[in-house]
Amino acid sequence: MTTDLGALNAAPRFDNQDPALFGQTPSQTVGPFFHYGLPWKGGGDLVGRSDMGARPDLMPPEHFLLAESGTTGRPQGEVIEIAGGVYDGNGAPLNDVMIEIWHANAAGRYASVEDGREEVPLDPHFVGFGRAATDSNGIWRFRTIRPGRVPGPGNTLQAPHIALSVLGRGLLKRLATRLYFADGEGNGEDPILALVPPERRHTLIAQRRSAGSWWLDIVLQGRNETVFFDL
């Protein structure tokens, strides 16, 4: 038996490569996140061993035991808690968002081979990176060390800050922003904060709620939208 290839090629195509069946492939948004793996148990606690960061309410007990914080000891510096809510353009809290943080230690040095300043000490018990999910009310929390000042562009010195990444449903890529402290040394001269219009800088400045506790809301759209940076 022979096959007429010309006739076969001319026949209608009904496989999954037929453009008549499918339009343009949609872009993949960030998420969803599997709460038994991302974020991990203790990912929001950079100074001790706790469950902060994960969502035990969304995990069966056997999954919640899979991982724990890798903290090796007590880091140097002032222990603080940073927290806030994540809201959409209508002011509704978002309970399916993941927040990542990255910042320097108390002496102002990152735990990275790219930070080669030998005169500034590393902290063997501080990695500077954490990950946490928003809870059922859209609130995120981290326990960490208040960072020191790090060099900035043009031989400047940046004010103490924490880099935040926001990842969630409906986002095509992570959103990058910063958290500064209302009483932070050098806020008025920070070269990055100076790039932000004065009337919008408040969206990056955390306010003290109590001793060692700071709060910063993240608004994804609308009138009070948080300032996000291009990477």
Image (tube, grey):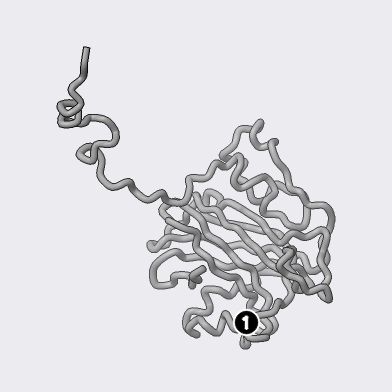
> Which image quarter: residue 89?
bottom left
Left or right side of 137 for 2: left
- Indicate the secondary structure of the residue bearing disc 1: loop
Q: Is residue 130 above or below residue 19?
A: below
Determine the residue located farthest toward the top in the rendered image.
Answer: 1
The image quarter in which residue 177 lies = bottom right
Q: Which residue lies at the image location 50% right of the left edge and 59% below the top edge? A: 174
Against 63, residue 226 (above or below) is: below
Q: With 103 as the anchor, is 138 left or right in this view? A: left
| Residue 160 screen position, x and y as percent | 68, 76
Question: For the view shown, which residue lies furthest in the bottom direction?
Answer: 189
Furthest-front residue in this view: 2
For label 1, the crowd category at 10 Å Cα-Cα, with few meaning under 14, some 14 to 19 and many 20 or more, is: few
Task: Tell me the quarter of the picture where residue 188 sits.
Answer: bottom right
Which residue is more in the foreground, 1 or 163?
Answer: 1
Residue at image x 63%, y 86%?
154
> In front here: 115 or 135?
115
Nearer-the-camera pick, 176 or 144: 176
Residue 123: x percent and y percent? Answer: 82, 64
Q: Residue at x 78, y 74 (%)?
A: 117
Could you say which is closer to the camera, residue 31 or residue 208? 31
Question: Disc 1 designates what residue?
Answer: 153
- Give the position of the N terminus as an image quadrant: top left
- Using the rendered image of the protein, determine whether residue 146 is visible from the camera's viewpoint: no
Q: Is residue 171 visible?
A: yes
Q: Position of residue 228 (x, y in %)?
A: 49, 70
Kind of residue indicated by mark 1:
Pro
- Image coordinates of residue 130 in percent, x first then y, are 66, 56
| Residue drawn at (63%, 57%) of the image | 141
Q: How many marks?
A: 1
